[in-house]
Each structure stands twice: as C-alpha cells, then as structure tokens.
Image: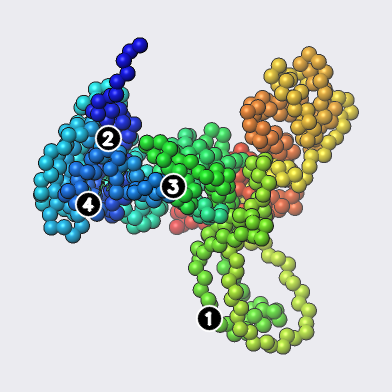
Amino acid sequence: MPEIRQLDKHVAELIAAGEVVERPASVVKELLENAIDAGSSAVVVEIENGGLTYLRITDNGCGIAPEQIPVAFLRHATSKLRCAEDLSAIGTLGFRGEALAAISAVSHVDIFSRERGANQGAMLHLDGGIAGEVIPTGCPEGTTICVRELFYNTPARMKFMKKDSAEATAVASIVTHLALSHPDISFKLLRDGQEALHTPSDGKLLSAVYAAMGRDFALSLVPVSGCGGEVRAEGFVTKPLAGHGSRGKQVFFVNGRFVKSQLLTAALEEAYRNRLLKGKFPGCVLHITLPANWVDVNVHPAKTVVKFVSDKQVFDAVYYTVLDALDAENKPAPKKEETPFYRTMTAQEYKAKATVQVPDVKKPAGSFAVKTLPGAQTIYVRDVAPVPKKPFIAPTPDAKKSYIITPPEPVEEKPMQVELPVPEQETIQPKKEIPWRIVGEVLKTYIICEDENETVWLIDKHAAHERIRFDALKANREPLMAQTLLTPVAVDLDADAYDAVLSNLALLRQFAFACEDFGGGTVLVREVPSDIRAEDTAATLEELAHKLVLGRADPMAARDELLHTMACKSAIKAGMTNDRSELAVLVEKVQSGEIQYCPHGRPVKYKLTKYEIEKFFKRA
Ligand code: ADP
Ligand code: MG
C-alpha cells in the first residue's frame, strides 16, 4: 500500500486556493465583495490581458490598520464572523476568511490601505502567499489591491485559462452583477485602459441596469415589487415580447448577493407561462430579500449557491409578484375624469361636491401591507397602484392555498361631512360610456379601434379570441361540450402517438374526445368537442397526440399544450365574418387589459399613436 502522508502547507494552500480562485473573474468577485463589505461608495476595477497579468481594485472603504494587513492574508482570518452562531445569519458578502489567502497564494500581490481618518497608510508585498514587511506609506483612504501574474506558480491551472478576451468578458459580467446588486455604489471597469462600464451610484436600480446592461434591455422592462410573508421580490423583468434566446439575462440577488438558482429561474419562468414565444426566455434583475436566517449561503466556496429554508415560500413570492407585474403591464391608465361643464349634476354628485373635505391624510404611494388572515394564509401584496384582482390559481398541483394579491387596505380617511338635504328625485343612470370606438375590420382579421387618447389599435381577432378561450378552458369556466359523431372516425397514428393516446384516454375525455383502441395503431374516435368540425377530427387528434408525446416529462405543461390546441381550434379564425357585437366583446377584453398575448406569446394588439401617424404624413 502506498504510504499515507499529510500534504505540506504550501500544497494544501494551493489546493484550497483552487476552490476560491478559478479565474481572474473570481479574484475580481472576491475583492469587490470585500470593497462592498468595507462600506465603499466608489470602486474602480482595472484589468490587463483579461486580468491574468494585471488586475487592480481600488476602493474608498474603511481601510485596514497597518498591523492588521498581514493578518488579513492568513487563512480563515476574517473580521466578519466571531462564532459558529454567526454562521446562521450572515449579513456580509464575505465570511469565510479565505479570499485574500487564496489569491495571494497563486500570484504576486501589493496592498495599500489607509484607515478612514488615519494620517498614514501602509503597504505590503506578497509573493505566492509569502508576506514581506509592512511599510508605512502615503496613500488615499481606502484599500488598493494589485494582483500580478495570476497562477504563475500553478501551471496546471494556467492551462485552463481561456483567451484574454473571454476572461475579460467574465470579469465584466462579475462587475455588472455586483453593480446591479448595489446601485448606491459607483462601479467603474477599465479594460486595457478603456472604460468598459461605469455606473452612476444614484441608488436607483434602473440607472444601474441602464449603465450595465444597456439601453435596449432597460427599455424592455416592467417594474416588479411585492412580497409574500417575509419574502420580498423587487426589481425588473422583461416584457413578454422582449424574450431572449437564452437565460443569460436573468440576474437574481438574494439579500444583496448574486446567486444562481434553479428555483428562482423556475418561479420567474412559470409566471411567463402561456405568454412567451417558444424558445424564448425572460430576462430580469430581481432582488429577493428575506430574513438572514432563512437562507444558507455557506453551501459552496464561491458563495453563488444558496439554500432556502422554505423553497415554496420563495417560489411563490417570486412567481406571484412577477405574474402580477405582467398582468398590470399594458393596462391602459385610467383616464382623468373630465366632466363637461354643460352636463347637469346628479343629486349624488352635488352632495359629494358640497361635502367639506378635511385635508388629506397622506398615504405613501408605494405602501404595502402584509396581512396574515386569521386562517394564517400568506397574502401576496404588490406595491404599485393596485388593480382589483381575482384570486389566482396556485401554480403547482399540490399548492392548495390560493393566493390573493390585495390592494393596500384603504386608510381610514373619512371626510368630515356636512349633511345636506338630498332632493328626493330619481336619476336615470346614463349608459356607461365605452372609452373606445370600433372603426371596423380589415382583411377579415384585424379590428381597428380608436380610443379616447387618440390612439389607434389593431386587434388580431383570432389571437384575442384564442386567448379568451384558453383562459376560460384553463379555469374550467366553460368546459368543452362533446358531440357524438354520426360515424366514428378511425385515425391512424404512428407508434409513439398511438401509445400516448391510449395511455391518456381519461385526459382526452376531459377535452371532450371519446376514443378507443381499434388495434394496429388505429384509434377510433366517437365524440369530439362541439366547437370543432367533424372533418378536423383526425388532424386535431394527431396534434394532441403529438403534444402528449412531447410533454411526457411534464404533465402540467402537456395539459397546457392540449388547451392551446383546443383554444386554437375553437376560436374564431382569420377570414371569418363576425358581427359587430362579437367584435365588441373581443375589443372590450383586449382594451381593458384583461388579455395581452395569445397563449403562444404572440401579441394581440398593435398600437399606433396619433403622433406616429402625423409623423408619417409629415404633419408633426
Ligand atoms: P472575508 O471577506 O471572508 O472576511 P477575506 O480574505 O476576503 O475574507 O478578507 C479578510 C479580511 O480582510 C476581511 O474580513 C476584512 O476585515 C479585511 N479586508 C479585506 N479586503 C478589505 C477591503 N477592501 N477593505 C477593508 N478591509 C478589507
Ligand atoms: Mg472576502
């Protein structure tokens, strides 16, 4: 048997360093986190050759006392933890006391630091973790750490480095994430002397998003804000039409720390279900905040993986707040009340006008309330101007609770009233005015309508109706009616589809298809939904079977896919002639904001402003 020996200190340190310092971007991450923990308001990152030859981070934080500088480079030396109990509620980004030791073990480091208010600072040079003398020196308040020749003593690691440009991109991505996590701090990145990023530090997340992720991304966002119990979700998500080709634009923070989390991704994407085009992914910059002891950040040395005490609460908080923000998006702003001066007042209006108002008790506009009902159900609350809501159906089949997004409770604000005698008189209520006018229909597909804000809308009647049908079917408001076929239809299917149909006969029954095995790859259909034409039977069943095959892994998604087909088949089609009252129903649903996308994520309406039209005709 080979002899077992303890590794010498240097080799052990190199191995440990490998876990924390994988590439230049991980060095930048650790040093920036230290700068943030030190309370800096401005940080500058400079890199050359992707950070491999030269990397310098300058902050204006609290600085380190001269005698403490060598201590900071020892393994497991930290000012952020004292005892084991502190581990259960970590409030700083760093806590493992490993970063400086690991970085200095695999590079040449110079550190300059001066404590706030101190007359003088100090510097220290380290080679491969071996520290020199601490030398008093003049330097600005804060800390500057310069890392040269990363991995000079670990050629094995060096081999894994990508091209300089790839390493520089990874560094930029880290700086972006940290900048988005702290909009109150100014982050600047200089890449081979060129400014690659500079955030303004005005404390506004959107400004940081604009600076770090670009104008187009910033313009495609919807604000999100709300909470469920102790879990709060805040930030921005992309509008459904601005889907991305990958998940690269999903940025999550948990208590200010950038994390990668399948749970958060799933919650976000679940909220976009049935409103995003196939193959597209939403983008986001979302901050999740929850009590420090509800989350474990000590899962991985790189600290980008977290564990939640309650996955379900976190999932639901994110899912419902995002869902709510998406639902609120695009709803037309309520029009200001404009009472024409010539209209006579009703008795009630007169009474209301004559009421002496006590000055308003101001209620903050973005207030929110978390209420726990006597039944102890968590209520999800959105902060922005509330719209009355129906209860949502919980997303997971096991979720028995239904969550309600409630408008903030009205603050008791009773105006002091001077009672006036109301003349006994019956007022005939004027018919509710509809704030839009249907102009007509073109190409037997698009409804044209004009609203009171002088905006013209084109509405795709099939897409709109498909959505209405889909929502109704999904909520089981209008179950599908079955019709018995005069002659049963025999449908030949390929082996997979045949198998899928036979193993889902009960599910198909819910969709008003009565089928039975006819043997040899053939299925006999006796009943179909009354909305579909008998001659479409075979095509529809084939489509359903195909979706069942694809959706084997995820029955929920498969069910939605079947609903898509049924909604599509039963909706009015482009090319059909419809009367005004039918069109009016569609327009009402679309203009009220109740529906915005067809179940496949295509838009249902197109907006043309007066300005756009006038610009075209060169009148503006
Ligand atoms: P950790 O951040 O996990 O505590 P590090 O090795 O990153 O461990 O840093 C060790 C200690 O050095 C920190 O706890 C902190 O006290 C000090 N330190 C590191 N960087 C800075 C900085 N930029 N400004 C002030 N103090 C710092
Ligand atoms: Mg640290």
Q: CA distance from mark 1 to mark 4?
A: 51 Å
Q: Residue at x 69, y 79 (%)?
A: 348
Mark nearest the camera among 2 and 3 is 3
- The residue that disc 4 covers is 63
- The residue that disc 1 covers is 359
Q: Residues within 10 Å of mark 2 (few under 14, many from 20)?
A: many
Is 193 situated above or below 415? Answer: above
- The residue that disc 2 covers is 102
* Cβ of mark 4 under 8 A from ligand 1: yes
Q: Residues within 10 Å of mark 4 (few under 14, many from 20)?
A: many
Mark 1: amino acid: Pro
* Cβ of mark 2 under 8 A from ligand 1: yes
Q: CA distance from mark 2 to mark 1?
A: 63 Å
Is label 2 in contact with label 4 (beta carbons under 8 Å)?
no
Badge 1 element: loop
- The residue that disc 3 covers is 88
Is label 2 in contact with label 3 (beta carbons under 8 Å)?
no
Mark 4: amino acid: Gly
In the image, 128 versus 536, the foreground residue is 128
Q: Position of residue 312 (x, y in %)?
A: 58, 44
